[in-house]
Image (cartoon, grey):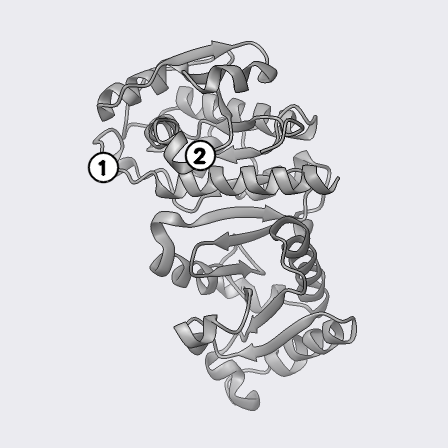
């Protein structure tokens, strides 16, 4: 990590979920995990109680400026701001949702202003946030709007040790997917993925493998014609631009060990086509990273897990992986200007 990289901002997530405890556990493991300095926005009391419930010694220290985080980080968990609420694991409420939204908004703003090297978002409960005015399907769409970009520009990539996968359509009903798939969508998002893997992950010429939509990738039109009408023409157009794409591949074969060795990222046609294999392979280390925006954003690829919150059993692996990835991307961007 260079001196030019600001500390990472961490949004609290829903305080009734596992976010607070995996944040404090990540801080406790900061040296062994090699994490860059980070600070949390709000919830100092929540974090202190989460650490106590988890049985780990974490000193929480409030800061008034993100620039102070790096100095505090070595001996205490820095928390920006006085906003707080009661710690009620497993029992979400409007007060907690309001704190989660405030934390997300401030973290995003600080990243946009360059006062945070990245924003790492802990899990939210979308239904709870909707009660306090959150009008987006998820945090990815919120981030796009906050950065002044269209939703299509914010590309969700799930990344773990075994797999990187991008769902080209995300938060929508499965019945809506065929109507949402267009050549333009596939081409636009594939370009973003290729460019970001090159810039943020240091992959010189990324290999993109594209899933089919239908069983057997349509079997030549017998099981659906989206591959012939939409997906294959998009692949051909991108190849003509010099991108390294293959497909459309039957999704049931693309995620086998032998299949995964042939590409750097899989482009899936819908949410579960990407997330099921990622979570099956890398659930405890899976990271949701947003591509295509001017800021760096990562998140653990799991939810609030209200059912186990406060019980001391939530695995911090995905949060640690998200923090590590955010730090690495921020450092790479700083090094290359």
Give the image location of residue 116, x and y in percent: 61, 27
Q: Is residue 305 above or below residue 276?
A: above
Q: Residue at x 22, y 32 (%)?
A: 312
Quick one: label 1 or label 2, which is nearer the N terminus?
Answer: 2
On screen, residue 10 above or below 231:
above
The reply to whether residue 298 is visible in this rendering is: yes
Locate residue 43 relative to residue 314 in the image: left or right. Answer: right
Closest to the observer: 271 or 63?
63
Residue found 60% across the figure and 38% down from its top: 142
Question: How dense is the environment of label 1, judged by Cα within 10 Å: few (below 14), some, or many (20 and up)?
Answer: few
Per the model, the C-alpha gap separating discs 1 and 2 is 17 Å
* Horizontal relation, residue 149 to residue 248: left or right: right
**Nearest the eye: 182 or 50:** 50
* Quarter occupied by the C terminus: top right
How packed is label 2: few (under 14 Cα within 10 Å), some, or many (20 or more)? Answer: many
Disc 1 to disc 2: CB gap under 8 Å: no
Q: Please, is residue 53 above or below residue 240 in the view?
A: above
Closer to the camera in the image, 334 or 60 = 334
Mark 1: secondary structure = loop
Instruction: Count numbered badges in the picture.
Output: 2
Q: Residue furthest right?
A: 241
Q: Nearer the viewer, residue 176 or 210?
A: 210
| The N terminus - image quarter | top right
Residue located 66% across and 63% down the image: 190
User: Could you say where residue 127 lies in the image, as x and y percent from the top left?
Assistant: 43, 37
| Residue 32 image point, x, y percent | 37, 35
Side of 4 where 323 appears, left or right: left
Which residue is under mark 2?
122
What is the number of the mark on residue 313? 1
């Amino acid at each position: 990590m260079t001196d030019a990289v600001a500390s990472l901002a961490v949004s609290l997530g829903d305080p009734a979920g596992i976010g607070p405890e995996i944040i404090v556990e990540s801080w406790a493991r900061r040296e062994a995990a090699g994490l860059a300095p980070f600070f949390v926005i709000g919830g100092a009391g929540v974090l202190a109680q989460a650490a106590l419930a988890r049985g780990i010694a974490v000193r929480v220290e409030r800061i008034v400026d993100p620039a102070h985080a790096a100095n505090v980080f070595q001996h205490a968990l820095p928390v920006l701001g006085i906003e707080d609420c009661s710690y009620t694991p497993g029992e979400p409420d409007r007060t907690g949702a309001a704190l989660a939204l405030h934390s997300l908004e401030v973290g995003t703003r600080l990243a946009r202003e360059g006062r945070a090297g990245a924003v790492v978002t802990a899990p939210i409960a979308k239904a709870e946030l909707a009660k306090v005015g959150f009008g987006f399907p998820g945090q990815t769409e919120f981030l796009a709007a906050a950065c002044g970009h269209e939703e299509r520009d914010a590309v969700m990539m799930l990344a773990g040790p075994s797999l990187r996968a991008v769902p080209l359509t995300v938060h929508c009903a499965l019945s809506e997917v065929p109507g949402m798939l267009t050549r333009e969508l596939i081409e636009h998002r594939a370009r973003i993925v290729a460019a970001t893997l090159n810039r943020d992950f240091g992959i010189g010429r990324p290999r993109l493998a594209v899933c089919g939509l239908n069983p057997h990738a349509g079997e030549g039109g017998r099981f659906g014609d989206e591959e012939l009408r939409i997906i294959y023409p998009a692949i051909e157009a991108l190849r003509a631009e010099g991108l390294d794409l293959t497909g459309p591949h039957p999704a049931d074969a693309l995620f086998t060990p032998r299949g995964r060795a042939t590409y750097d990222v899989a482009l899936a046609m819908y949410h579960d086509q990407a997330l099921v294999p990622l979570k099956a392979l890398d659930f405890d280390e899976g990271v949701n990273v947003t591509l295509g925006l001017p800021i760096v954003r990562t998140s653990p690829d799991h939810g609030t897990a209200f059912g186990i919150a406060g019980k001391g059993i939530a695995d911090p692996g995905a949060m640690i992986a998200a923090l590590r990835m955010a730090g690495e991307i921020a450092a790479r961007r700083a090094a290359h200007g």
